[in-house]
Image (cartoon, helix red, strand yellow):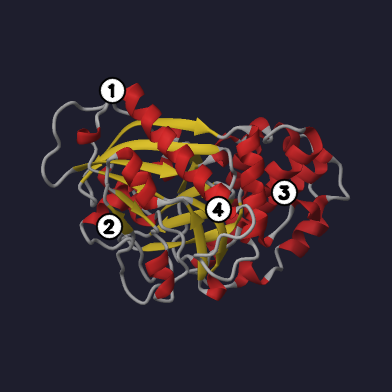
Amino acid sequence: MEPVSREKSAVSVLRAIGLMSGTSLDGVDVALIETDGERRTTLRASGYRPYTDEERALLRLALADGATLTSRHARPGVLAEAEALITRAHAEAVEGFMAEQGLSRAEIDVVGFHGQTVLHRPERALTVQIGDGPALAARLGIPVIHDLRAADMAAGGQGAPLVPVFHRALAESRGMEAPLAVLNIGGVANVTLIGPDGELLAFDTGPGNALLDDLVRERTGRPFDEGGAIAAAGRPDEALLAWLLTHPYFIRRPPKSLDRNWFSHRIVAHLSTEDGAATLAAFTARSVTRALDFVDSRPSRWIVGGGGALNGEILRLLGAGTGAEVVTADSIGWSAAALEAQAFGFLAVRSLKGLPITYPSTTGAPQAMTGGVLARP
């Protein structure tokens, strides 16, 4: 990451803060970027505001209540309380980050606020991210772009993944050779496949860290499998894996996207902790390699971001399954932890400029579409 520049950005380049709270429910990632929303992008500082155990417990209840939603505006059960928490936590994350970096409100042009996904059911044209964009803008005194998925889904798209246009901009600005894959392993894993001529294909590949995290938390009380050590100590259940990979999702042609709750860690309830972890890690890796069924030009390099970039066993399995070079975002000067937050800063700038954020080949939208709602302070 580069330090914060004190010079005022050129008119076409905006300074944006991006925010991300993923389905792993670990905390809020904050990232500062300067970008024209196209190819000029400078990655600046990043930060993190973890959730407390009590906050995380509330958000897990919100995921359960979210599964019952039939309207994107309804907030039954604990969802209203959870939405207030998400808004407050994101505000605190931004305020803490700006204080740490010595930034004033006047130095930030826009905040990209994804919110917390509690339901994503594209087959029902329904996606729900809790978080109050206008309230966040009012508290921060900075314009906020929020509700970034709704326009795409209303037009018939999947509403996900949103980050491919950012991945391509980063790769092109650094002169990276295609075909190339950028893989984010959060609670759900999604891939951006960049073709030789810059064409994009993107989709959710399957479970990311969510199932493994849930298993490890239930069996050991730890939040995740640090370094993939537990999975590396076990043996995967090959019969179970073969059965899991017959799920219709994996043979469906992209674009396609997945809800965190489509699969459960309890599919390995009969296995030891080590063997269960090994099976779930292999499930993540093998569902990623199934992405190669849909490409004409196999990527020679995979760049991995998200929490899964810290899991050495998943990375090992990916290398073996793809037969390609697998590197972490950190190792090439990007940020595995902040990549999605950076993306939402980038998308906020594109939204302000009316530029497309989704495409037929990334979400199945009928045409290239912009998205997001602007909330002014």
Judging by the rendered image, the residue that carries numbered circle 1 is 102
Q: How far, Cα to Cα, is label 4 from label 1?
A: 33 Å
Q: How far, Cα to Cα, is label 3 from label 1?
A: 42 Å
* Residue 361 seen in the current view: no
Q: How far, Cα to Cα, is label 2 from label 3?
A: 37 Å
Q: How far, Cα to Cα, is label 2 from label 1?
A: 26 Å
Q: How far, Cα to Cα, is label 3 from label 4?
A: 33 Å
Q: Nearer the viewer, mark 3 or mark 1?
A: 1
Judging by the rendered image, the residue that carries numbered circle 2 is 351
Judging by the rendered image, the residue that carries numbered circle 3 is 280
Residue 36, placed above or below residue 7 = below
Compare marks 3 and 4 and give the one earlier in the sequence.
Answer: 4
Examine the image and state in which quarter residue 95 appears.
top left
**Label 4 with label 1: CB-CB less than 8 Å:** no
- Residue at 43% of width from left, 67% of height from top? 363
Question: What's under tag 3, amino acid-wise?
Answer: Leu
Question: What's under tag 1, amino acid-wise?
Answer: Gly
